[in-house]
Each structure stands twice: as C-alpha cells, then as structure tokens.
Amino acid sequence: MLSRRNPQLNSHGELIHLLSIEGLPQAVLNQILDTAGSFLSVNDREVKKVPLLRGKSVFNLFFENSTRTRTTFEIAAKRLSADVINLDIARSSAAKGESLLDTIANLSAMHADMFVVRHSESGAPYLIAQHCAPHVHVVNAGDGRHAHPTQGLLDMYTIRHYKRDFTKLTVAIVGDIVHSRVARSDIHALTTLGVPEIRAVGPKTLVPSDIREMGVRVCHDMKEGISGADVIIMLRLQNERMSGAMLPSAGEFFKNYGLTPEKLALAKPDAIVMHPGPINRGVEIDSAVADGTHSVILPQVTFGIAVRMAVMSIIAGNNA
Amino acid sequence: MSTLHLDAEALYADLLAGVRTLMKPGSVLVGIWSGGAWLAERLQRDLKVAGEHGVISSALHRDDFNSRGMTAAADHTKLPFEVEGSHIVLVDDVLYTGRTIRATLNELYDFGRPASVSLAVLVDRGGRELPIHAAVSAARITLPSEQRLSLARDATGRFSFDIKGPN
C-alpha cells in the first residue's frame, strides 16, 4: 500500500509514482537526472528504442488538452518500447458524466500498467494513485495550479546541462507565477538541489506575496529581478486561466516584464533563457531573445523526452 | 576475507596474450562497463590498437529490470566506431551466468550488425544459465553463488579482485 509519509515512495524510499517534486529527496532527483543523461544518447542510435517497458501499457489520460506534453510522453513511452494508448478523456467518458474513479477502474480492467495524467483539478493524480492497483504507476503531467513535475525535472536537467553546479546559481522565474504549476515545481526542485537564490519576478497580481514562504525572493521590478541572474525562466501568460482584470493589457505586460535584449543584458553574460512553451512572442518574450544565442528553449524540448523516459523507467522498475 | 587468491595482474598478462590471438585486422575492443571497460582501455594501449576502445553497458537491456529496477543510471555506452560490419572483441572481468553478455549483445545490435563478436574474460567462474562461451578466459574458478567477484582498479591503474559475501 501507499506509504503515509510520501505516497510517491515505497517503503524502501524508491519512486513508484511521480506526483510532485515537493518532498522528494535530492538523491531521487539526481537519480532521475542521471538516468535521463543515459537516455539522451538513445536518440543517436540506429535503433532508437530500448526494451525496458516492453509488454507494458501506458495510458495517456489527458482531461485537459496539451499537444506538446502528451506527444513527448508518447515518444518517451514508445522509445521505452511500451504500448501507448492515448485517451482524449475530456471529450469522451468524462463528458458523459463518468466519475474519475470509475474511469480509472475501467481502464485498470483493460490492464493498464501506467497512467500519465493531466487534469485541471489539483490533486487528481494523487486520487488516482491512491485508488489504482498496487502494480499500476501514476505520472502527473500537470494538475491544476498544483504541480508539473516532469517539466520541473526537465528544467533542472537543462540547468544542470548548461551550468553544472546548482549551488552557486541565481535563478529568476518571470511572469505569471500565480497560475503556474511549472513555477511551483521549479521552485521545489531548485530548493532541493541547493540553489541559493531563487527570484519570483512579476506584477503583484501575478506574483502573490505568500510565495515568499517557499523561500524565494519576490521582485516586482523586472530589472532588479533579472540583474546578475544565471538562469531566466520565462513563463507563459496563461490567458485561459485568468478571470477578471489581473492585467491592464498584454502590451503593458510586455513593456514591464517582457524579456527583451535590453533587459537580458542585465543578467550574467552567459545567462540561459528558458521557457516551458508554448511561447507568446511579443507578450512575455521578444523574438530576438527567443531565437537568440542565450535561448535554450528548443534543447529543453529534447531533454524533456529523455527526462520522461527516465521517470517512466524508474517508477516502472520499482514495486509498491 | 576470502582465502581464494587471484592475482589480477598475472591474469591480465594471460588475457593480453589470448586477446592478441583474437584480433584480426580492423578488430575493435569493447569493454563492458565498468571492469571490462578498464581492461579494454589497457588492452587497447598494450596491443597498440589505433583509435579509441568502446565501452558498453547492459543497463538498458537487463532481464532483471522488473525485480531490480533501474540500477546503473549514469553509465552509458560509447562506441566511437561503426558497429555495422566490424569484428568486435568483447571484454569483461568476470563471466558468470551469461545474462550480462546476452543483454550486452542486444545493446550492441542497437547500433548495427557486427560481422563477428567474440568474448574474452579475465575470470570464468562457471554457473552459466545461457549458452554463452568465452573464446579466451585467463582463469577458470568455482565460487559459491552467494559470493560476488569483481575487478577493482587503484589510482596507479593496477588491477585486483574484490570478493564480497560469505566464505
């Protein structure tokens, strides 16, 4: 059964589900990053597949749309030789009124071995992990405003790839932090990996002051926020999650918080610019920066596949 | 401590002589991570083979993945030559059940179809569970199944054997 301490770990402290980065020990994060490193080279082989999940069925359950994340999970599972079943749940059973747990019970009866879950409700993957059979593993592919752990991990992989040592870095996370599960996952991961300075940068409406409790420095001034930064993580302005007047206008936001070459010049000369995608050019990031030499946005996508392969292979190899 | 005495350096001299007989023009040395990779590195030097030796890991093809999970995470295969059509001399420290060799052959085939693969090991400890045979083995010994035998390398590059488990 699930451990009461952390439902993601078995009694030996091994990862059996990936639900959130919060509470995961540094050793587990490093194991995932190291394993991802060995999967990156699989793409260079004549046979771009390894047999670790051969005979296993991975169900992609996307209760909320996301082409990119679903596709990278699908590629990752296929490179591990799993059978992948994509379910557009939002348009099928849930729309007919079936409850989440009934959906899971039905899919379990189809002999699923792993669920990759995206849901607009925070905590949905936890609920599934608590109710599925002991041999079934759950990966959170983004739940509400709560967590997006594989994005957080691929961000850490990217930072480690370019910067090597986490313990001397200044990392600025810029933009719509209040709606961002990516920001939350990044902050937990950066903290666990020993980053001394994490800044949350954005207007008061999008950077809540209680985020200080996570150990970050809040900056409402963009120039202060990115000056001297080694890593800048730009977030997408999530118009679809905004209700009411949180922002004057996208143009106003770009003027104050959009990353332009002039603002980027305040960061360290070798700073890297990251973005979880999809990017809104001219809203949170200038094209000259998105396509510039500091940008590592496309390598993030490539690393994301290796990181998802690592997560799936690690949890599939550990028993509850 | 075990009373079994294995002089790894003396055995290496025998392995070197044996591998010399296996090498054809254009043959490449591939060591199985980690002990076999050390051996291949030194063999490459002592046999004056041009280029760089290969390193191969069985981690992604292991048959005990479901019970042991992902083990050696950070080691990866590096084959700095064309596998397709080449004569490969695979080197490992200890040959036991043969399962590592089976997994390694699958890993090798992910990079291409070699013309031939032969196996050279420092120690063959018997106990095979698969039909796998070494063309060269510097020593043949028997050990209780609960004992683990592996190669160690000190800072100067000298080899010794590490035996773990009850006598």
Image: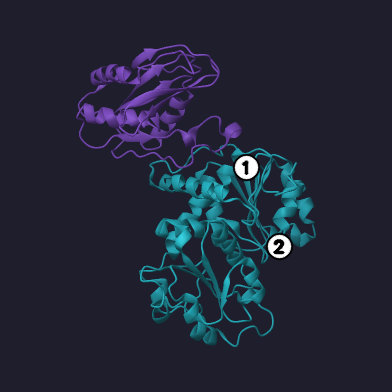
Chain colours: A cyan, B purple
Residue ID at (56%, 60%):
A191
Q: Position of residue B155 (x, y in %)?
A: 33, 34
Q: Which mark is residue A122?
A: 2
A239 relative position to A294: left or right: right
Nearer the observer: mark 2 or 1; the answer is 1
Q: Position of residue A38 (x, y in %)?
A: 44, 44
| Whether residue B86 is visible | no
**Helix, strand or loop under label 2:** loop
Q: What is the total number of numbered labels drawn onto the structure image?
A: 2
The residue labelled by disc 1 is A14
Residue ID at (48%, 47%):
A34
Name the residue type under label 1.
Glu
- Pick the front one: B3 or A63: B3
Q: On the rendered image, what quadrant is the C terminus of chain A found in?
A: top right
Residue ID at (46%, 29%):
B103
Q: Are marks 2 and 1 on the same chain?
A: yes
Q: CA distance from mark 2 to mark 1?
A: 24 Å
Q: Mark 1: few, some, or many residues within 10 Å (few <14, many ≥20)?
A: some
Instruction: State which quadrant residue B10 falls in.
Output: top left
Residue ID at (53%, 29%):
B63
A230 relative position to A196: left or right: left
A19 relative position to B33: left or right: right
Q: Chain of mark 2?
A: A
